[in-house]
Amino acid sequence: MKRRSRKWFPFAAMLAGPLAVALSGLVMPSEPVEATRYGKACLRIEARGMPWQSQDAPAFPEAEQARAQAGCGARWIQVVDHHGSPLVKNPFLPCPFADAEKNSVMLRQWVDTIHQAGMPVVSWFALSFCGEGAKTHPDWRQVPIVPWPDPALADFVCCINSGYGDALIEYCTWVIERYELDGIWFDGSAWTPIWQHPLPLTCRCSACQTKFKSATGREIPTKVDWQDPVFRQWLAWRYQQFGGYIGRLAGAIRAKHPHAAVVINHYHRPEIPWHSAIPLDRYAADIISGSEAFSPDRLDLTMRLCRAYGRSQSEVWRPFDTSSTPEANAEGLLRHALICYSAGGHPSFGGDPFDPKMSPTAALMSPVMKAIHPYVGGPSVPYAAIHVSQQTETFFFGPVEGLGWGPDPYFDALSVWTEALGQSHVPPDYVYDSDFRSEVLARYRVVLMPVSQAISDAQAAAAVEYAQAGGTLLLGVGAGQLDPQGWPRSANPLGQSLGFAFEGVPKPGESQSQHHLLTAVQDGKAIHVSGMRAPVQLTAPDWKVLYREGAESNGSPAVALRSYGKGHVVVLSLDPTRISGITAVDGGKTELSVTDETAAGGTYSLKFVDDALAPQTFCPDLETRLPALDMPKFKCSQLRLDLKAGKDAHVSIEIRSCRAPIVGPIVSAGPQQKVWTGGQALCDLPVDQWIQLEIECEFASPEKGATYQVTATHPNGQRYRSPRLPCPDAQYCRTDWFVIFGPGTIPTTFYVDNAELAGIRPDGTREVVHRMDFEEGPEALSPPLSLARALAERIKHLAPPPVEVVGPEFVRVGAFEASPGRVLVHLHNRQGACSDWQQSAGPPVTIRCGFPIRSVRLPIANQPLAVREHSGRHEIVVPAVGYYRVLELQR
């Protein structure tokens, strides 16, 4: 491969430093990030390591060539060690390596090898880490306002407001030029390190204190105190500072190196709260918005968070799994890629650069990815938007103890509404606080504010104006009750204008523990939810109650609808995030079904078919969520079930809480034909015979940690009982969730029957709260009614979408404005397999457009489709969506 010309470098060097950002648009405009070599790459793989690893590995040039031939389009390496210290001598950041010159030679060889294989090279970089910098310059170190969870953190986390911030910018621009890199992928993009618990909170170094006092006239607080207005002011200032620094860092790199891509891993997402200081709001930076996700629902949500920053490209990473066969590995990795594509963004992956399975797996993935890649991205065809509120996430949910690195109520609520709209084939855009303005909202037919408790007067006015002008507006429990800093209002501006009044402020700590029964007014159907509540009074005369609290006809309104101006308003008194009931997750060659093949009692049982070819490693999976069992009412939870395992079966049973601490007892059955718990074998597991398992968990108390005991009863009545064992998390104190799944990779079956969860009171009496004997037959696996899903369908009736999709809920859709007059519709069958790619398999899907269509084709297959008019809409029938289809519509 011919090297890139360096003729422009001497001139570009003049732009180093603070002047770079100011002049970047005038003197040397950067290439659009999507036009950079990295931005154009399809299969992006992080396969990094120290440069000497590449030299020590046999035939590393051949490995890079094999990756390129397998379809890898871009590669990450690293020019710093794992704690951010440079591998090479440079004028800006101290280097701890005595053989730095040797490192430099090896880095150059590695970059040249990758370039010669035809791939761009970016470097991984932990933005806030620099171990040698912290050692050499103690004033660069971050200073927390709470103790470090691990004192060693002080040895390598540096503050961007100190001299480190400028030194990092200089090093990045220098290292890109010296080694001809094609960009930098900034991992560790959090001001506060958020990888250990309890979460620390930074920074109060001298540089931060000077800047904060200059901006506000106040001192940085010395403790976490949510009642202190200065503490809340400091949190808002941290967002501004860190977002501003990212913009300055990226601007300097892109000004000096227009060809270079900059990716920022946004550490403010599910399981990572406000501590990171990454804005959950728009901020100016010339970057690819990056992130990470590890499950389908979190991936879809995370990609939408990335796209809401408004940049031309978004990317979400996951590990490059090679734990099974290349075919099975490719299945799971492609699922990640396809969910990214249907949400409008790009995937990336990370793995061992010398893993021999990487290239064979990539070779199976790349044909599918390369075929779809040209049709990815662009603005959504606007229909529904969800308000994503940094103000609410930080100042309403922030004070709740125990959140972070586990399911948390803010992102759980966001996920539930996103999933409900996705199942209804109207996937939402997200709109951040700074974009919640009339001119932005006017693009959408539907705006949802499900968790918008903390909003400004201007945001409230924009919401009211939106409904008045003809939009459909959904208001979640407590919407508008707080100001942008999270302080209670004397009067709710939304309620005053729209004719309702919440009774107080909901309690975020109750988001997952309070159980409520709702009854539909029209048909009497019941929905069970667990979540926050704030009773609502309907003060305008024309409200129509859709759901009431409780089973009585005079119950308090839970959901109500009214016309307002030219539009509609829906208001909720409860948060429908948690619904009680079971969820079955399967796909690929895994399956969950009710069967009469065998039963421990009665006629039916639940059959699990396991296989390596699965959408997730935990499939097949039965998830059961329930009202919480906790103290003081119950001292223990007790799960009983009957299990029949076939040869080679691997069954995992886990008792959990939806709120941290999450992990309770874990029992595994199958490996070595034994029942296991606590790392020890309890007893043999008879093949193809029913046994009974009982798992009793005693909750943690102030005096002692949580413990559990497992009892297995064989067909002959022989009992095996474990000693009392400590729970994986000693603080485990509530049960509202249990899962039974097959983590194995060998084709096999197992059966479950008579699953029963009970609470044990302090007096020893037992109360059964849930029982599944599957005697309803196939209907026993019916998913519980979802209020969010029911409201999504109601909203579609009120405001028909411009692109209406009629098909199974597991076929997900994305619709994008590729160019004027050209719309791309992506259809992803989440139950499909790679073998269905471009095959005449899968369900038919009908698309009805509210705008005229001249022609339609499947561009990957170059196949035209017919368009017909139906009920005033233009209709297209896609005969089969077995895996993934892209439609190109010409208006």
Image: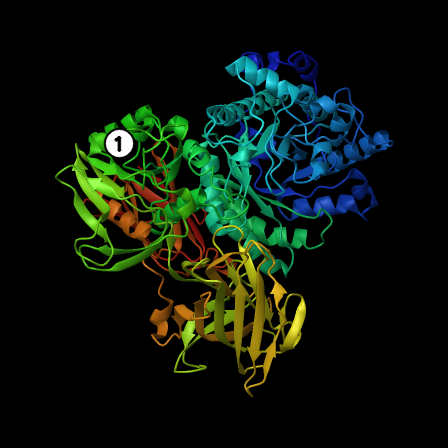
Total numbered labels placed on residues in the image: 1
User: Relative to the observer, which residue lies in front, 742 or 816?
Assistant: 742
- Residue farthest to the right? 98
Residue under numbered circle 1: 494
Q: Quadrant of the C terminus?
A: top left
Name the colouring of the figure. Answer: rainbow
Image position, residue 456 (x, y; %): 35, 26
Q: Quadrant of the N terminus?
A: top right
User: Relative to the observer, which residue lies in front, 87 or 773?
Assistant: 773
Query: In the rendered image of this protein, does residue 172 appear above or below residue 372?
Result: above
State the image quarter where residue 663 is shown: bottom right
Query: In the rendered image of this protein, does residue 125 appear above or below residue 533?
Result: above
Query: In the rendered image of this protein, does residue 41 appear above or below residue 330?
Result: above
Residue 617 can be seen in this image: no
State the image quarter where residue 241 is shown: top right
Q: Is residue 858 left or right of residue 252?
A: left
SS for dot 1:
helix
Amino acid type shown at disc 1 = Leu
Image position, residue 183 (x, y; %): 64, 30
Query: In the rendered image of this protein, does residue 435 appear above or below residue 584?
Result: above
User: Relative to the observer, which residue lies in front, 330 or 112?
Assistant: 330
Residue located at (77% from left, 39% from top): 50
State the image quarter where residue 479 is shown: top left
Image position, residue 754 (x, y; %): 43, 75
Image position, residue 21 (x, y; %): 57, 16
Residue located at (78% from left, 23% from top): 90
Label 1 crowd (10 A; few <14 / some 14-19 / many >=20): many
